[in-house]
Structure formats: structure tokens, C-alpha cells
Image (cartoon, rainbow, N blue to C red):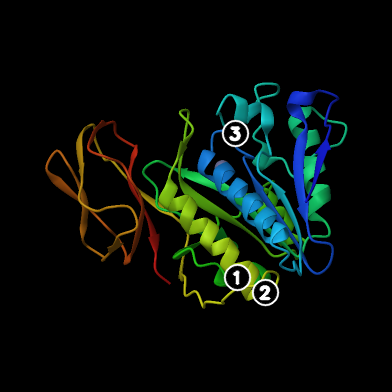
Amino acid sequence: MDVRKLSIDGFEYSSLEFSHFGSKGPKVLITAGLHGGEATGVHTARLVVDFLKAEEAAGRPLNGRFEVLPVGNPTAFRRLQRSSPYDELDLNRIFPGDKEGTLSLRTAAAIWDEAQDADMVIDLHCCGTYGRSYTLALHQEHEPARKLAEKLSVAVVIESGGTRGQLFTEASHKGIPAVIIELTGGGPVGEVSVPASDEAFAALVGLFRAEGLVAGPRNEPHPVFHGKLEGIRCPTDGFLMPKVAPGERVAKGQAVATLNGEPLKARFDGTAMQVRPSSLVFAGQPAVVLAPLL
Ligand SMILES: [Zn+2]
């Protein structure tokens, strides 16, 4: 292992720490913490670093070049918030960045540099405490992204809305296979969902094995591909009671929650990806976010 500290603006607290493993074969770039509050992603990336360290220590061959950046946005991470307190820019909306810009723009430019020769880019994020993990990819538009998502054992794949300026969308538009894995957890208390982190870690190791980059048994994942996320919003203020759990399959017409006792129904067959808990809500707030089956 080789740890490289990259200074962004001359200050220790904002430098990026890349862990490198292996010297030959395809390059895998794994990033996390681009949004500083998304702790399950950071934790998962650290598990990958520990795994690769153990592979090396055991003398098992690495047939890939791995580069892992567990904390992509160190100043935001220290406050467990989405954006850096230094310029309030959303790091995952400003790729490819600007080497002469503010801290976040420089950080994006530095990470973008590392992605240029990558054969795959996997960026780890969080979809909130009430979300179910999924792979997010431009799978309908970009064949390389679909093929990468297919090899990950995260059960659900969702089509991205395609917002530009994200590391994975910019990489996809350059033809680099790139996805996000959105993980349960995160938020201002730094919550790590251990089941979500275990699932994503297993998916990443499974991918490395499937590609022959590390030794070990290969499995064949069968993730289910979905369309873009769609929220069911609360039509009025009131008391919301969920009727489904995150990750649950739902049928068209099924009541996924009640608001003041009235059903809120799914408009299509799909999977519940985010479910607001029983709560007092205001009109317009999303109650349940669904992904349609394709
Ligand atoms: Zn994020």
C-alpha cells in the first residue's frame, strides 16, 4: 500500500488521502465522502482499504490498480455536512472542477485528474436514514455504466436523472464506466448503516473477483434495473403513516402510506426506495420515493 497525501490549498485539513494498491492491470477508482455527511460511504471505502491491505499482507496477488479516497471532502466531513464550510459549493455538482478556483473547485479538479485513466469509477454516497441502498447509473444511456452496474450485487439499480457536474455523470459522458452506490445512513450524526455498508463492501469485493482483480470465488449478481426515482408527495398537511418498508416491492394502485387516514397510492409497479416514517408532514413534502420497474 502506498498512501499519497495531496495538498489542495497548502493546508493539512483540506488535503486528500489516496490509498494505492497493486501495480498492474485495470485501474479502479473508489471515492467516498464527496458529500461530507455521508458516513456509510466513508466507512465502506475504509473497509475496502482494510480488505486490500489484508490481501497484500497475505501475499495474494492484486491484478488491478486500486485507488481509494475514503474522504473526498475533508472539511465538509469534519462537520458531517454536505458541502465545505469554506465555499458552500456542492462538490458533486462542480466536476470537472477548476485548479484555480475555490477549495471545492480545486478538490474536484484533483479528483477528476485521478479519474482520467480509471477503467471504472465507483463513488459512494448516502440516500438517508430512511432510504434503501441502490446503484445509481446512466444505465439506459451509457452501455459501460450499465455493464458496471450489472456486476455489482447491490439488489436495485436506478436510472440517474443525469444532473451534470457529478463525478459519475461527467465520467460517464467521457466513456469511463462510472456509477454511484447510494447507501442507507448518513446525516448530521454520522450514522453508519452496518447492513448497507456490509452489502456494498460485498458488492465491491464481488466486482473485483468477477474482473479477476483479486483472488476468490466469483458469484453472479442479478440486480434489478429500474427507471428514475419518483416521489409521491403529501397533498395536504397532516399525519403520515407509512404502509411499506424501504426496499419493498410495490404494485400499481397499492397504498404505500396513509395521510390523515386517506391512502397514497403507487402509480406504477416498482420498489419503495425512501419511506418517510410516521410523522407530521406539510403539503408538498415527499412521503414515499418509488422507482419504477422496467
Ligand atoms: Zn451524496
Residue at the outermost front position: 58
Q: Amino acid at mark 1?
A: Arg
Q: Amino acid at mark 2?
A: Glu
Q: Which comes sooner in the sequence, label 3 or label 2? A: 3
Give the secondary structure at mark 2.
Answer: loop
Question: Residue at position x 57%, y 68% from top?
Answer: 206
Tell me if residue 51 comes above or below residue 223 in the rendering.
Answer: above
> How far across and how far down the image is residue 210, in percent?
62, 75
Give the quadrant of residue 78: top right
Q: Which comes sooner in the sequence, label 1 or label 2? A: 1
Q: Residues within 10 Å of mark 2 (few under 14, many from 20)?
A: some
| Residue named by callout 2 | 211
Q: Is there any visible trace of residue 148 in the rendered image?
A: no
| Residue named by callout 3 | 36
| Residue named by callout 1 | 146
Tell me if residue 57 comes above or below residue 45 in the rendering.
Answer: below
**76 sits to left or right of 256:** right
Ligand 1 location (quadrant): top right
> How far across and how far down the image is residue 255, in percent?
19, 55
Residue at the outermost left position: 261
State if disc 1 and disc 3 touch (CB < 8 Å): no
Q: What is the CA distance from the residue labelled 1 to the residue labelled 2?
A: 15 Å
> How far across and how far down the image is residue 66, in percent?
74, 58
Q: Nearer the viewer, residue 157 or 195?
A: 195
**170 sits to left or right of 7:** left
**180 sits to left or right of 289:** right
